[in-house]
Amino acid sequence: MKTIVDDIRTRFIVEWEHQQREDLRQIGVRPGTVVPLLGWLKLHSPFVQLTHMSAVDWIEEGELQLTYLLTDPVGMRSLMVCTRIDREEATMESVHALWPQAVTYEQEINEMFGICFPGSPRQGVPFILEGWDDMPPMRRDFDTVEHVHAHHPSRPGREHTDPRAYIGRVFGERGFLHDDD
Amino acid sequence: MESKKLPVLPVSAPPEGSVPHAPLGEGCFLGETQRPKAPKLREALATIKNWFRANSLWVMAYGTGCGSIELRPLTTARFDMERFGLAMRPTPRQSNVLIISGYLAVKSLKRVIRAYEQMPSPKWVVGLGSCTINGGMYWDSYNTINQLDLYLPVDTYIAGCMPRPEALLAGFGYLMEKIKKGEANGWHHYLENLDWYKENQKKVITAWDLPDYNW
């Protein structure tokens, strides 16, 4: 595993790296580096399979993170390639020329996070949300409860518990998970 | 030629206070000993038809949410729903029971409406799990409906998250009793209030491209 990341470092700028598990390593690169890096990995490394593509909304930092999970099917190990793009002008190069299955991932990320992949087929075609007219629902400033009250009527008589207050009551004021842990 | 009379067998009188058994063929269903009170022909026929309907429920093999996991043990050897006349069918054209098994996404709702309307009448809807009743744990999800009976006529709800196969069998028993009594008329309610149902459906399915009724 170490040799592969060293090999990557001789060719591309790696901003950070992290050993998540014995068989899982994360590296962070700039957005412009992603597609050449993934192409190089597919051709010259054992990480030939795109297993997953996902996004994370870092709203406090005004960025969206894209994660490409590559797998070495022989050595049974994985490499996560992470990059961060601007949240307001969320555009990223498509990798569907490298792996055709990326079309579906990019279609879903486009729908759920509003990230545009120019050139990728099926961008803007509804994947799960048919007739959706609100902002992308996986963005953290999307108010789910407000949307539900506006669109999905409920049977009266249901009581709700605020999760934050409930966890505070059960596990103390600071809650179960602490930020500094 | 003189007809020969058959000998009459001596029958002992029933003990005092006992309820006599109804003769076979006159309302003696599944050990029910109570004789119907002089039913008219139409009512009697309806009773017989409902009895047949209740004992041959054909369920559409379709799952919308996690509750459909509980349908697998129900169909296989351990719980074996076929002993109650419940059978899985592959298409809506052959089914008369539609189970909404758990949360129902808006995208699925459109397909479910289409399947329900294609089913031959009489047909029944079973709402399985808390999600169909009041949203369950997905009550604040942006993409699931919270109350099924606004969009489809529900005959039986089975509460739980998720209800075990025993609860499902109890629910089906309840549905069968309801059908036998002639009270499971959700499909009739759907046709009588089609405009109200369609209005509710179109409110939540904004990309509406279905015909007025899916024959």
Image (cartoon, grey):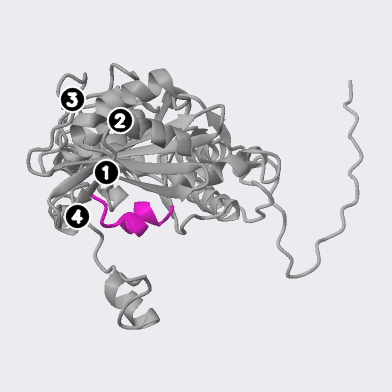
State whether residue A74 is above or below residue A67.
above
Single out the residue that lies furthest toward the front: A10
Q: Between tags 3 and 1, which lies in front? A: 1
The residue pinned by badge 3 equals A123
The residue pinned by badge 2 equals A105
Please tell me the numbered disc located at residue A15: 1
Label 4 crowd (10 A; few <14 / some 14-19 / many >=20)? some
Res. B183 visible in picture? no
State whether residue B43 is above or below residue B5.
below
Image coords of residue B43 (percent x, y) = 47, 42
Among the two numbered marks 4 and 2 on one chain, the one whose residue lies closer to the N terminus: 2
Three-letter code, disc 3: Gln
Task: Please state the extent of the stretch shown in magenta in the rendering.
Answer: B129-143
Residue at 70%, 62% (x, y): give it.
Answer: B19
Disc 4 to disc 2, C-alpha distance: 23 Å
Disc 3 to disc 1, C-alpha distance: 30 Å
Chain letter for mark 4, please.
A
Do the residues at discs 3 and 1 belong to one chain? Answer: yes
Three-letter code, disc 4: Thr
Disc 3 to disc 2, C-alpha distance: 10 Å
Three-letter code, disc 1: Glu
Q: Between tags 4 and 2, which lies in front? A: 2
Residue at 47%, 39% (x, y): give it.
Answer: A2
The residue pinned by badge 4 equals A144
Q: Between tags 2 and 1, which lies in front? A: 1
Among the two numbered marks 3 and 4 on one chain, the one whose residue lies closer to the N terminus: 3
Element at label 1: loop
